[in-house]
Image (spheres, rainbow, N blue to C red):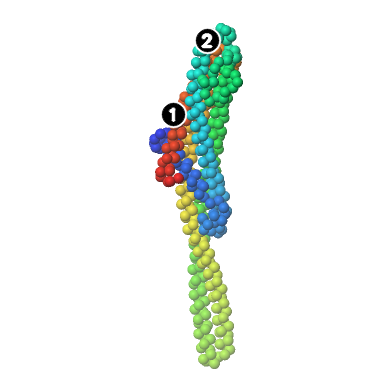
Amino acid sequence: MFHSSVGEESDTTRSGGLILTKDQIKHLKHYEIKGLALPTQLDDVIAYLGYETGAGRGLEAVDFQGSFTLIHDHASLWNPLRTDLLTVSDKLVVFAGLMQVYGDSMMEVFDDVRALGLVEKYDIKTLEELRKVELQLGHRFPGIEQADREDLGYFLNRILEKVRERESEANAIKNRLDDFGKQLANRVAPEIKLRLACIDNNALNTEIAALQKKIDERATAIEEKNKEYKQLVKEAIGSVAAGGLILMIYTSVQAEKVRKERNKLRSEQQADIAFMEQKNRILASLGRVRMDLQDLDLIVIDADIATKNLITVWNKLATFIAESSMQVNGIHDGLSMRRFKNQFNLVVTPWATIEVDAKKLLNVFAEADREFRAEYGV
């Protein structure tokens, strides 16, 4: 039954994939807030990451900017869609009430036509002939603009037009929901998983380990140069004491050469240590970003389930509207009065269900909004 597709309790039957609950509406709100909070300007992305380049393929700031922009832009679609969905639902509730009035009124018109003897007077056999009968009908069909004429045909045309209008509005929401759901499942979710895979498969740990080995080896080389330099200086001082001027000069030259080699190693060591510190900062940053993306991944999974269930609810609602609209096609001027009466009833009947279930949908959203504001203040 259609009624079962709108859940009034908490998430008790999610596994069936058919129940739309207030918790699922809240999941969509969570997704919207998280998605809109992502930075999209490159400078802001750099500030969020703590680096611009150096993380490796798929992990540079510009890569995250592309992902964040995709998610942000998609999340921004939810509030306008939600607003329009609720607006159309309100219209459906109002029109459903009117349609039931129109159904009762049309039956009264039939009774009046017969009671007043108009069937015999005008030899009414078909809808075409019935359309021409003029009665005071305005008060019986509220919500329809008054015209100069009061014939049944005018009111009938306006009623059928309004059915078509509601169908068009419902289908527009259906298409937007479908697009939203497809983008969420086929673009947003894979994009998050891609970025998580890049983080998990990054080469930073390997690079840092290799860099650490290089730094350790160079530290040993620097220590050896320090010892060599000290020894040469000691020998040079000893040569002076012994009067060996030539040996002192030679030793001093060798010592200076060793000192320059040591200084070169030290400069390289400083550069690699700074580089490793940068790599470590990036690695730490990626750990934080991974946690954020894992949270977002879970939120997207919940939002995807909620979207699919909302689509299911709306599709079933649209099915009832389409049924009413399809019955409109069966109304033509060649119908006998009896057949027209039956056909018009078929147009009206689905709207009793539409009214009940559109109200349920509105109530689920209202309850979700109240709870979300109470929990998060937004």
Residue 116 lies, in percent from the top left, at 52, 10
168, above or below 368, in the image: above
Front in this rendered view, residue 311 or 87: 87
Depth check: give the residue in front, 243 or 1.
Answer: 1
**Camera-side residue: 301 or 11?**
11
Q: Residues within 10 Å of mark 1 (few under 14, many from 20)?
A: some
Element on which disc 2 rests = loop
Closer to us: 182 or 3: 3
357 is higher (above) or lower (below) than 201? above
Badge 1 vs badge 2, beta-carbon distance below 8 Å: no
Residue at the far bottom: name it. 243
Q: Is residue 333 left or right of residue 105?
A: right
**Residue to which mark 1 is pinned:** 3
Up-down: is 250 above or below 367? below
Label 1: state its secondary structure: helix
State the mark number for residue 332.
none
At x 57%, y 23%, the residue is 146
Crowding at mark 2 (Cα within 10 Å: few <14, some 14-19, many 20+): few
Q: Residue at horizontal 53%, vertical 12%?
A: 113
Screen quadrant of the C terminus:
top left
Q: CA distance from mark 1 to mark 2?
A: 42 Å
Camera-near label (1 vs 2) is: 2
Task: Indicate the position of residue 153 as horizontal and vertical percent values.
Answer: 58, 18
Q: Residue furthest top?
A: 120
Q: Earlier in the sequence, mark 1 or mark 2?
A: 1
Residue named by callout 2: 116
Kind of residue at badge 1: His
The kind of residue tagged 2 is: Leu
Kindly identify the residue that appears in the image at 47 percent across and 42 percent down. Answer: 29
Whether residue 67 is visible here, answered yes or no, is no
Left or right: 153 as drawn, with respect to 292: right
Residue 361 spot, x, y in % from top left: 46, 33
